[in-house]
Image (cartoon, rainbow, N blue to C red):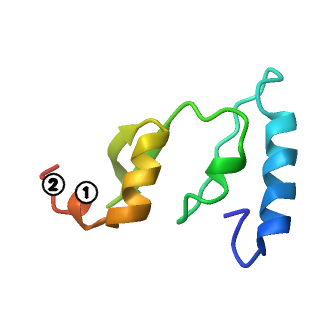
Amino acid sequence: EPDSGLDIDAVQAVAKAISQVSGKDATVIVITHYARILKFLDKLDFVHVFARGQILKTGDASLADKLESEGYDWVLEQKV
């Protein structure tokens, strides 16, 4: 969780560093509970929701926005 406990300026700096590494023959996995860092990344291919030891939902950046506004309950209530 690279954005844990950071102010917005630090989040932007971390996102910039991640973006510089991403796409240079590298896969970058960012684990976070909040979508704010994702808004500063240059490229976001997938958003995965992990719970119960598995991926429960996969989507694009709009999934992160939905989670930010509606929370995780709707995903957790889905049958696996």
Q: Which amino acid, mark 2?
A: Gln
Q: Residue at x 70, y 38 (%)?
A: 28
SS of the residue under disc 2: loop
- In the image, 35 versus 47, the foreground residue is 35
On screen, residue 60 versus residue 19, left or right, reads left
Q: Residue at x 84, y 66 (%)?
A: 9
SS of the residue under disc 1: helix
- In the image, 56 versus 16, the foreground residue is 16
Dot 1 alpha-carbon crowd within 10 angstroms: few under 14, some 14 to 19, many 20 or more: some
On screen, residue 59 versus residue 11, left or right, reads left
Q: Which amino acid, mark 1?
A: Val
Tag shown at residue 75: 1
Q: Which residue is drawn at 84% across and 46% down?
A: 16
Determine the residue located farthest toward the top in the rendered image: 25
Image: 51 above or below 28: below
Residue 3 spot, x, y in % from top left? 71, 66
Determine the residue located farthest toward the bottom in the rendered image: 5
Q: In which quarter of the image is the N terminus?
A: bottom right
Image: 55 above or below 67: above
Dot 2 alpha-carbon crowd within 10 angstroms: few under 14, some 14 to 19, many 20 or more: few
Dots 1, 2 in contact, CB < 8 A = yes
Residue 18 spot, x, y in % from top left? 80, 44
Residue 67 spot, x, y in % from top left? 39, 58
Residue 27 spot, x, y in % from top left? 70, 31
Q: State the residue position of label 2.
A: 78
